[in-house]
Image (cartoon, rainbow, N blue to C red):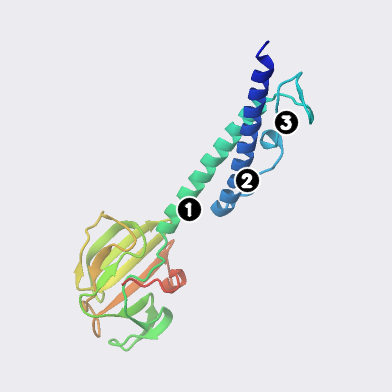
Amino acid sequence: MSSRPRDVAEVARRVASLRDTLDVIRKREAQIRLLAGLPATDSGGPNAPATVGLAGDSTAGGPIHADVETLIQRADLLSARFAAVTDSLELNAKRFASVPSIMPTAGWLTSQFSRSRVHPLLHVSRPHEGIDVSAPMGAPIVAPASGTVTKVGRENGYGNVLEIDHGNGIVTRYAHCSRIDVRQGQRVTRGQRIAAVGSTGLSTGPHLHYELHINGKVVDPLTYVLSDAIPD
């Protein structure tokens, strides 16, 4: 007695199992695309459910048609889509890592971003292009996002100054530091200690002056800080 019918049935079972597996993967792909912020894909075409089996054979449900080539196309398409999703997630992760979403030090907000305020020492009205956070002398200052240190030095009025380029046109600036713990050209990550609070330059007491520049324009740093994102 020939074993061909049993072989045919086994192949049909495996192909059907592969079809079901691809359907599960397709549904998971749709969920991941949503998380990655990518548009949904069409359900038709090579990724549509295929009727599988072996030509010339039949089951209780009627004739079944082998279309292994269609399943291979579906698998290849899903593989390419997952690669695109992975690239998108990695890109989004890198972008998020470069967004200054935490406060660089813990303390009290004593002066907000303003287009015009009276300087506490010079007694003249001029823009305050950042925020002031009062904190104990020597308190840690951390990087609010990953980036590369582009400036370490001393400036009139600002004392010891540090700047970090986070990419995508985002630059942060830290002034009045008592100490700077990184060097120019160094790569830093979110939460890494970069300096210490001080009172160098024109200052009424130990605090951090923190600025955020986007494409060369100053913006309020608090617009990018996540709720309760204060370092311990």
Q: Viewed as shown, does residue 124 lie left or right of 181?
A: right
Q: Nearer the viewer, residue 144 or 168?
A: 144
Q: Position of residue 84 (x, y in %)?
A: 53, 42
Give the distance between the C-alpha atoms of the residues marked 1 and 3, in whole angstroms: 38 Å
Disc 3 designates what residue?
51
Query: SS for tag 1?
Result: helix
Quarter of the image where one finds residue 69: top right
* Pointer 1 with pointer 2, Cβ within 8 A: no
Q: Earlier in the sequence, mark 3 or mark 2?
A: 2
Give the distance between the C-alpha atoms of the residues marked 3 and 2, in whole angstroms: 18 Å
Q: Earlier in the sequence, mark 1 or mark 3?
A: 3
Q: Earlier in the sequence, mark 1 or mark 2?
A: 2
Quarter of the image where one finds residue 99: bottom left
Crowding around mark 3 (Cα neighbors within 10 Å: few <14, some 14 to 19, many 20+) is: some
Disc 1 designates what residue?
92
Query: SS for tag 3?
Result: loop
Crowding around mark 2 (Cα neighbors within 10 Å: few <14, some 14 to 19, many 20+) is: few
Q: Viewed as shown, does residue 20 lie left or right of 166?
A: right
Give the distance between the C-alpha atoms of the residues marked 1 and 2, in whole angstroms: 22 Å
- Choose mark 1 or mark 2, whichever is in front: 2
Q: Position of residue 4 (x, y in %)?
A: 67, 14
| Quarter placement of the N terminus | top right
Q: Nearer the viewer, residue 23 or 44?
A: 23
- Choose mark 1 or mark 3, whichever is in front: 3
Q: Amino acid at mark 2?
A: Lys
Q: Residue furthest top?
A: 1
